[in-house]
Image: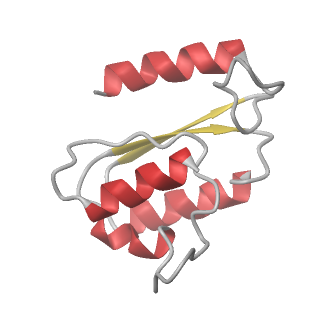
Amino acid sequence: MGGRVTWLAAVSNQNFKAAVPFYGGFIFDRWGNTDKSPFERSIELNCPMMFHFGEIDPNPSLSDMAIFDQELTRLKKPHQFFKYPDADHRFMDYTFDNYQATAANLSWSRTIDFF
């Protein structure tokens, strides 16, 4: 949910200067009583975004990532995508079986540099 929430915050709050969604699952889904998914609100993005994804994460999948990239490029929204080999969803969570130290350390370093 964190990547989705980050995406929603970045398209909802014009005061954001940058945003870094990790994983970003369920971006295409409408939840609750909203009329648009986070993806459908991409036009509203007003800050650069850096994305971190695991290559073996099914949500978002590699094909989902390609769709995100294509849409943000079409809209001329500044963004960067990083994918991590052998990393699954929640690869930064050291309390979870999917923890991937290499991906976690590199993605965190990139995030700090981005801000």
In the image, is residue 112 above or below residue 69? Answer: above
Q: Nearer the viewer, residue 70 or 109?
A: 109
Q: Is residue 65 above or below residue 95?
A: below
x%, y% of residue 36? Answer: 46, 81
Q: Residue at x 51, y 63 (%)?
A: 70
Image point (54%, 39%), residue name: 22
Question: Residue 106: where, in percent of width, then height?
Answer: 55, 16
Question: Is 40 on the left or on the right of 63, as rendered?
Answer: left
Quadrant of res 31: bottom right
Above or below 86: residue 72:
below
Determine the residue positioned at 25% across, 50% down: 47
Residue 20 in picture, x, y percent from top left: 42, 39
Q: Name the spot of residue 4 as percent of width and height, x first.
A: 52, 55
For residue 84, side relative to residue 1 (left or right):
right
Q: Residue at x 79, y 51 (%)?
A: 58
Res. 68 image quadrant: bottom right
Furthest-left residue in this view: 15
Quadrant hosting residue 45: bottom left
